[in-house]
Amino acid sequence: MLTSQRKNLILDMLRREGQVVAKRAAEEFSLSEDTIRRDLREMAAEGLLRRVHGGAMPITPDLPDFTARQAISSDVKRKLGAAAAAMVKPGQMIFLDGGTSTAEIARALPRDFAFTVATHSPTIAAELEHHPTAEVILIGGRLYKHSMVATGAAAMSQIANMRPDIFFLGVTAAHPVRGLSTGDFEEAAIKRHISACSAETITLLTVDKLDAVSPHVIMPVSALSGIIMQSGADEARLAPYRAAGLDVMEV
């Protein structure tokens, strides 16, 4: 079998199953595991997939910075944000992660009762400047400019003294086995810390983030309370998340 044929078979498996296990691929294609591993290394170098122990996962494309992502904010994210905002109850404290989806939550928050919003994103805080009933707590620290969020020890210390009712978490990738992940080590750490301090953690997902991995794991999907998901994903792709006990709301 030609190398190009093998790689096409591997890509087909990756699209179909959301992962490639080297041992299983070798059995299915009647090839040696060494051949599959060599192909996976080459395909990872070509940017076609991400190598993990025992096989490969879909690659998550590099995200543009926050300003660029704002410019391409879509109706889908507005729907996700509105669904999340509708979950907020009077008197609650919520924590909004940085990101374009959570910015849509800030824009959609109710204006007829009082609540508190904590965030480590100055951009999110600015969205709430003229909100009539929201008390806003802005966490400070070292600014991670790519995502426009505060990180580091100072931010972690402030968050440790909070107990939000809901943390609306932003991620770059979600996988039922590999967990929730993002592209920066420190950002992953602070997201994990906020979740640990919160009563509930809910993430907002577009279809392109499903069954993918980024370099730094935040936490397993089982640590979530629920997912607000763009409609249109195959039920087979959502089934593992529901099996983990998660409430998956499609909007």
Image (tube, rainbow, N blue to C red):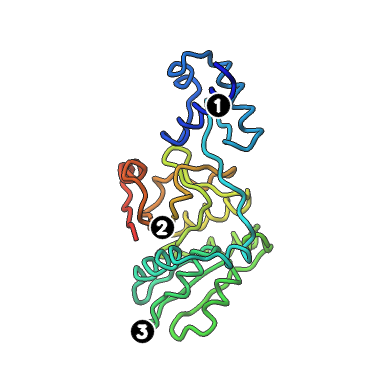
For mark 2, give the secondary structure: strand
Mark whose residue sits in front, 1 or 3: 1
Residue 35 x/y as whole percent: 58, 17
182, 73: nearer the viewer: 73
Name which residue lies at 66% across and 64% down: 141
Q: Earlier in the sequence, mark 2 or mark 3?
A: 3
Mark whose residue sits in front, 1 or 2: 1
For mark 3, give the secondary structure: loop
236, 121: nearer the viewer: 236
Q: Badges 1 and 3: C-beta atoms under 8 Å apart?
A: no
In whole angstroms, how far apart are the C-alphas of marks 2 and 3?
A: 23 Å
In whole angstroms, how far apart are the C-alphas of marks 1 and 2?
A: 37 Å
Whether residue 107 sits left or right of residue 122 in the image: it is left
Residue 126 x/y as whole percent: 57, 77
Q: Which residue was labeled with disc 2?
A: 202
Name which residue lies at 48% across and 58% down: 169
Q: Which residue was labeled with disc 1?
A: 7
Quadrant placement of the C terminus: bottom left
Q: Earlier in the sequence, mark 1 or mark 3?
A: 1
Residue 107 x/y as whole percent: 47, 75
Name which residue lies at 63% across and 57% down: 64
For mark 1, give the secondary structure: helix
Whether residue 101 sits left or right of residue 63 in the image: it is left
Label 1 sits on what residue type? Lys
Q: Badges 2 and 3: C-beta atoms under 8 Å apart?
A: no
Label 2: few (<14), some (14–19) or many (≥20) C-alpha neighbours in 10 Å: many
Q: Earlier in the sequence, mark 1 or mark 2?
A: 1
Q: Which residue was labeled with disc 3?
A: 112
Residue 128 x/y as whole percent: 52, 78
When the figure is inspected, residue 241 is found, relative to residue 134, above or below; the finding is above
Please tell me how many numbered marks the rendered image carries: 3
Label 2 sits on what residue type? Ile
